[in-house]
Each structure stands twice: as structure tokens, then as C-alpha cells.
Amino acid sequence: MSLPKPVMRGLLAKRLRFHLPIAFTLAITAAIAFKFTVTEPRKKAYADFYKQYDAVKEFNAMREAGIFESVRPSGE
Amino acid sequence: MFRALSRVSTAGFRSLARTRTGYSAPLASRCYSHGKVETDEEFDSRWVTYFSKPDIDAWELRKGMNTLIGYDLVPEPKILDSALRACRRLNDLASAIRILEAVKDKAGPHKDIYPYVIQELKPTLTELGISTPEELGIDKL
């Protein structure tokens, strides 16, 4: 039984035509998904933390813990 | 690779709006700003002529095959016939069998191409006494 002639040209172009849009879409989707599941929550967590951050209070807590050399706890 | 990409992207953008029924051969839709587009037949006959050179040397055979393998196509049986005869003139059986291996590799996942090519080349292979990699058992890893 004689085999019919298959398509022999442009096979890569055909494959790319199908797969490249999918690849780019998936890549961009992955980037967008990462942005909204990781970076935005992270940024929000930092922002929320620093919204109510009292630098002076924290400094005094650290001072009392005795970690500084330039300023000793208020007791000494 | 990039030529295939440009072919795909230009064709893709243009045909994005319309349906893809009866999409013609990508080679014809290459987007040159100027210059004639070579037809498939012209391409084939150019390569048949290249390998038909009576005093072709080994370098030209290798160069021709390497260039041909770089294209986004599986060479037509008539081009391969010409190349195999060039191998015969150069007494290079190894290259002849390697050409067959290369054709199988170029077909990639399309398993119907290689059997067709071998079918078309059978008379030439018999005439020139070239065994296929399968007959020699070197197609298995």
C-alpha cells in the first residue's frame, strides 16, 4: 500500500503558531498571578505594619532590652 | 528558527481576525518588504542542482546538507536522491546513511514523514546499495 505524501514544510512554523501564543499567555498570566498573590500582599503587609508603627516606642523597648551601647537602659 | 517565528508572527497577526480554513503553505506568505518570493518548486530544483554537480566535493556535500537541515522543512525525496547520488560519487556511504538519519530526525514527532521518504527513495537506495539505519539496526539506542 503506497503511502500518501504528508506535509513536509513549515512544520515548526505550524507548531510555533499554536504554542507561542499559549506560551506567552501562560507566562504573562503567571507573572500577573505572582504579582497579586505574592508581591501585593507582601507590600500590603509592610504598609500595614508601618501604618501604626511608633518608632520612639520601639526604640525605648530596645533601649530597655540593653542592646545599645550609646544609650543605656533608663535604670542604670 | 527566527525566520519561522517571523513567518508565524506576521501570518498570525494578519489572520487573527479571520478563520483559518484552507490556510496555504506558510512559505508563500513570508513578509518581504521587497524581493521575489521563491516558490517551493524553485527551492527544490535549486537544491537538486546543487547536489547534482558532477565534481561536487566533500565539503560542499557537508555544507549543503547542513544548510538544508537548518531549514524549517523535511527535504523532498528528489533533493535527497540528488544528495545520495553525490554521496555515491564521493564514495561516502557513511554520509548517505547519516542523511537518512537526519531526515528521520527532522520529521520530529511527525511519524508519517520518514516512511514516506523511504518509500519514495527505495529505488535509489536499492540502485546505490544504501542500507537504511533500520536495516543496519543502528536506529535503536
Image (cartoon, coloured by chain):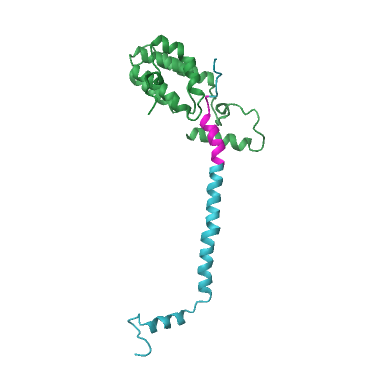
> Which of the 4 quarters of the picture holds residue B66?
top left
Span highlighted in magenta in the image: A8-21
Between B93 and B80, the one lying in front of the other is: B93
Residue A57 relative to residue B59: left or right: right
Residue A32 relative to residue B103: left or right: right
Q: Is residue A10 rendered magenta in the image?
A: yes
Residue B75 drawn above or below residue B3:
above
Letter of the chain shown green in the rendering: B
Residue B90 relative to residue A5: left or right: left
Q: Magenta segment, principal secondary structure?
A: helix
Q: Quadrant of the C terminus of chain B?
A: top left
**Residue at the location (40% across, 15% down)?**
B84
Between B52 and B114, the one lying in front of the other is: B114
Q: In the image, residue B27 lies at what x, y percent?
A: 55, 27
Q: In the image, residue B9 lies at what x, y percent?
A: 56, 37
Residue A30 drawn above or below residue A18:
below
Answer whether residue B64 is visible to the viewer in this image. Answer: no
Answer whether residue A51 is visible to the viewer in this image. Answer: yes
Chain A on-screen colour:
cyan
Q: In the image, residue A49 lies at what x, y percent?
A: 51, 72
Between B96 and B58, the one lying in front of the other is: B96
**Residue at the location (44% across, 80% down)?**
A58
> Which of the 4 quarters of the picture holds residue B95?
top left
